[in-house]
Image (cartoon, grey):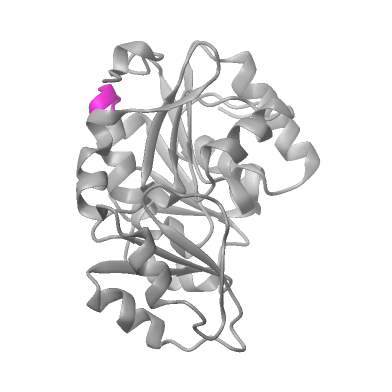
Amino acid sequence: MTQKTDFNDLSNRDFVLATDLDGTFLGGSERDRETLYSWIEENRDTIGLVFVTGRDPQFIAELCDGGVPWPEYVVGDVGTTIAGVGMSRKIEPIETLETEIATTWGDSGTRVREALNGHPGLTLQQTAFRYRVSYDLNPAEFDDRALEIVRDMGFDPLISDNRYFDVLPRGISKGPSIQRLVDHLGVARERTLVAGDTMNDFSMLACGLPAVAVGGAEEALRRALEGHDHVYHAEALGAGGILEAIDALNLHRTPGGN
C-alpha cells in the first residue's frame, strides 16, 4: 500500500498551489504562463505544486513531459484519483486516500454507461476512468433528465463549462479530495491556495481553503461563489490570475510582487 513517505514531503513548504489545469494553470497569456512556471521551478524548495483536475494521469504525464512543471501530487479525474508523483515521475495512486472513493463507486461504470447509453446530448469519453464515467455534452441536444437518472442511481452528476458531464461517486469531488490530501500531508491550510475557473472547481473553491477564481471564470461558477468571502476573484486570466492572487493574499513572494 502506497504511503505519503514514498513521495515528497510538502509539510515544510512555505506555500502550496493546488490548481486546476484547463483555463487556470494552462490558461492566460504565454508570458504569464512562462512567468508562473519559471517562478515555481526556481522556488521548488519553498513551493509545492498539486494539480487538481478533471484530467487523467496519462494526460498529466504527457503534459509534463512536454514542458509543464511536474506536480508533487495529483488530484485527478474530478477528485476520484488521489496520487503522488514518484521519483521516477510515475503518477501512483495513494491507496489509503482512495479507499472511500473506491468503496463508494464499487464497480459501477458498466451500469452507468448502460443507463445513459444513447441519451440525447451525451457522447461517452473513451478514457478508461477508474471511479467515474464522463461525457462530452452538447447543450443544444442535452436532455436534463440525465441528472435525475444519475441521482436516482446514487451518484452525483456534474456539468461544467456547459460542455462536460461527469458521473461521480456520491460526495466525491475536487473539494473533499484536496482537503483529504492536504490533511494527509500535514500541509498548513492557510498556506495553500486552490485555483479554478469552472463549475467542476466549485467544491474545491468553496471548501474553505484560500481560493482564487481566475479571470474569465465560468459565469455559473462566479454566481455559485457569491457569499464565499474567502474566495479571491482575479482580473487576470489563467496563470496571471494565480500570480495575482498569491500576491494579493500575501502567500509567497512573487516576481515583481511583495
Q: Residue at x 77, y 46 (%)?
A: 29
| Residue nearest the observer in this picture, 125 or 24 | 125
Left or right of 212 in this view: 67: right
Task: Answer whether residue 248 is visible to the viewer in this image.
Answer: yes
Query: Residue 161's quadrant in the figure?
Result: bottom right
The mark total stands at 0
Magenta includes 72?
no
Q: Identify the residue at image location x=62%, y=88%.
A: 140
In the figure, 84 relative to 110: above or below? above
Relative vertical location of residue 57 with respect to residue 167 in this rendering, above or below:
above
**Quarter-wise, where is residue 203 in the image?**
bottom left
Write down the region rendered in magenta. 183-189
Question: In this rendering, would 153 be left or right of 10?
Answer: left
Give the x, y percent position of residue 25.
61, 42
Residue displayed at 23% across by 29% down: 96
Residue 16's place in the image compared with 44, above or below, is below
From the top left corner, tell me how far across and down residue 196 is, in percent: 50, 51
